[in-house]
Amino acid sequence: MKPTLSVDVMGGDKAPGVIIQGLEVAACRYPFVHFLLFGPHGTIEPLLAQRKGLAEKVTLIHCDEIITPDTKPSTVIRGLPNSSMRQAIKAVADGHAQGVISAGNTGAYMALAKMLLKTLPGIDRPALASLAPTLKGEIVFLDLGANVECSSKNLEQFAIMGEIFARHVLHLPHPKVGLINVGSEDIKGNSIVKEAADLLRASSIKNNFYGFIEGDDIARGTVDVVVMDGFTGNVVLKAGEGVMHLSLHYLKEAFKSSWVARLGYLLASPMLKKLSLRLDYRRYNGGIWLGLNGIAIKSHGGTDALGFAHAVDLAVDMITSRMNEHLLKEFASDLPLKEVINR
């Protein structure tokens, strides 16, 4: 069966134009994928008419309501039943698609995804994960803000989900999992992270549990999976983005400081282009919901076509790697059959 992806075409700062452009790129990469597009016919059909190759691989479903960046999560829960975001998520819940992508309002997307898709059996809370570059390659880190306060059991589940993602989607045979703490020593940290570490040492991924790590271990690539509560994760994410932008700003200023610096820029140009490509945020676009009963990817609202295409990459990789089947095998194996069915 060919994978089908559901897309909220009206979500994002530059929708629907950038979304359609990104899907055109993705359609070339994945000719076997079919796309369900949700949005107003009158707005989207003219864009598809300019892209015959993409138009042949999509089904357009009309939606006349749009969730804006200012729409409150409580509003989308109670109303806007025909919004492009809600209907795109509902398509996965109803079994018409295996995954959904939206670049729209993050709070609304989180609320609707949890309400409509629900969590997989055995998982208490879904986690928001993402990829990031390190000195040794890519890492997956979670949670990034979906769960501000976490129990030790939540952190254990996040770690197991991250480890399974690293093995089956990133294809790392023995991914190392680290738990963020204020120090690497076992005596440091609060009771929650200490209890989480104890749980992980006795868990199914005990052989891949590295132990406690500190903030500077993230960029070093000390581990392949970084686990933390959502408050810490969101701060780490935003601080990392800020440091990267600051560094690039200072680098540009330095090359403008004198004619010698400008000459140096010309000589270093090939290497700088390589650096720019390595740090290109578009390569890491896409927040990954782990633990939901369906694949859900959150694209950055301000991304461009290539960034949105990368979000599609993540969704396709998760579907083709049968990510949720692996999670089910891990978390639902010990649950009573009645509870699995009810979830």
Image (cartoon, rainbow, N blue to C red):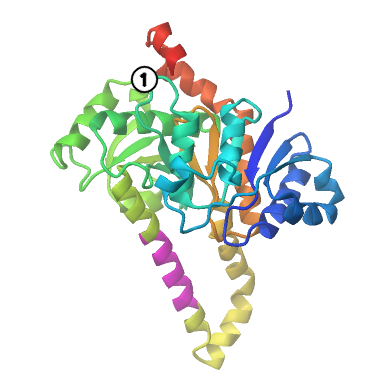
The furthest residue to the bottom: 259
Whether residue 186 is situated above or below residue 308 in the rendered picture: above
Assess whether residue 242 is covered by the magenta stretch: yes
Whether residue 302 is situated above or below residue 98 in the rendered picture: below
Count of marks placed on residues = 1
The furthest residue to the front: 79
Residue 231 as seen in the image, left or right of residue 325: left
Q: Residue at x 18, y 41 (%)?
A: 185
Q: In the rendered image, is residue 146 in sight?
A: yes
Q: Circle 1 is placed at which residue position? A: 204
Q: Residue at x 38, y 59 (%)?
A: 238
In percent of width and height, residue 58 lies at 77, 41
Q: Residue at x 62, y 25 (%)?
A: 95
- Per the image, label 1 sits on a secondary structure element best described as loop
Whether residue 326 is situated above or below residue 341 in the rendered picture: below
Q: Residue at x 71, y 46 (%)?
A: 26
In percent of width and height, residue 222 lies at 37, 44
Whether residue 262 is situated above or below residue 46 in the rendered picture: below
User: Considering the image in quadrants, where does the N terminus appear?
Assistant: top right
220, 115: nearer the viewer = 115
User: Considering the image in quadrants, where does the C terminus appear?
Assistant: top left
246, 17: nearer the viewer = 17
Q: In the rendered image, is residue 139 in sight?
A: no
| Amino acid at pointer 1 | Ser
Assess whether residue 25 is covered by the magenta stretch: no
Name the magenta segment's main secondary structure: helix
285, 16: nearer the viewer = 16
The magenta region covers 239-251
In percent of width and height, residue 163 lies at 43, 31
Classify mark 1: residues with Cα within 10 Å, few (<14), some (14-19) or many (20+): few
Snapshot quadrant of residue 276: bottom right
In percent of width and height, residue 241 lies at 43, 61
